[in-house]
Amino acid sequence: MKTTFLATVLCAASLAAAPAPPQNAFSPEQIKFGPVPPVLAPGAQLAVLEGDPMASSGDFTIRLKMPDGYRIPPHWHPKRENVTVVSGGFKVGMGDSFDAPKMTVMLAGSFAYLDPDMHHYGMAVGETVVQVHGAAPFQINYVNPNDDPSTKK
């Protein structure tokens, strides 16, 4: 009986000392949002779910939480962008200038993919969460360089 108890204690101790395996499943309350990188305007929050969006290769998945009216000016990406609206609504438009009347509303559950070099822009309708996945590196190229918040002081 003592051997079984000692074996149980030793086994528990070795499991506690072992490094935790990487997390590959998240409940909503486990997703930790933080500030967006400088290439996006302040006010939104970002969570990295998997991968490294800034790595030179590999896959990534991020979530962007935006307040009502948050805008992303016309831009393009060198790699394909896959977008799923998790909650709220996300207006999307195509082209080189922000034209709100020409935007299409994507409601929660909607999915879109944007091929490389496709010029587009977006705006949150209510508090909105979108999930973006694709191949790293994730890069935003603004059509009008003056729209790039990372160049402002």
Image (cartoon, helix red, strand yellow):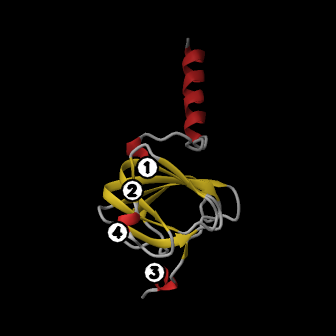
* C-beta proximity under 8 Å, tags 1 and 2: yes
- Identify the residue at horizontal 35%, vertical 53% (top origin): 89
Residue furthest to the right in view is: 57
Q: Position of residue 150 (x, y in %)?
A: 48, 80
- Identify the residue at horizontal 62%, vertical 68% (top origin): 117
Residue bearing the label numbered 2: 90
Disc nearer the start of the sequence (1/2): 1
Residue furthest to the front in view is: 102
Cα distance, mark 4 to mark 1?
A: 18 Å
- Identify the residue at horizontal 34%, vertical 68% (top origin): 43
Residue bearing the label numbered 4: 43
Looking at the rendered structure, the kind of residue marked 2 is: Phe
Residue bearing the label numbered 3: 147
Judge by depth and name the residue closer to the eye, 98 or 63. Answer: 98
Which one is closest to the eye, mark 4 or mark 2? 2
Q: Position of residue 134 (x, y in %)?
A: 61, 55
* CA neighbours of label 1 inside 10 A, class few (<14), some (14 to 19), many (20+): many
Cα distance, mark 1 to mark 2?
A: 7 Å
Q: Quadrant of the N terminus?
A: top right
Disc nearer the start of the sequence (4/3): 4
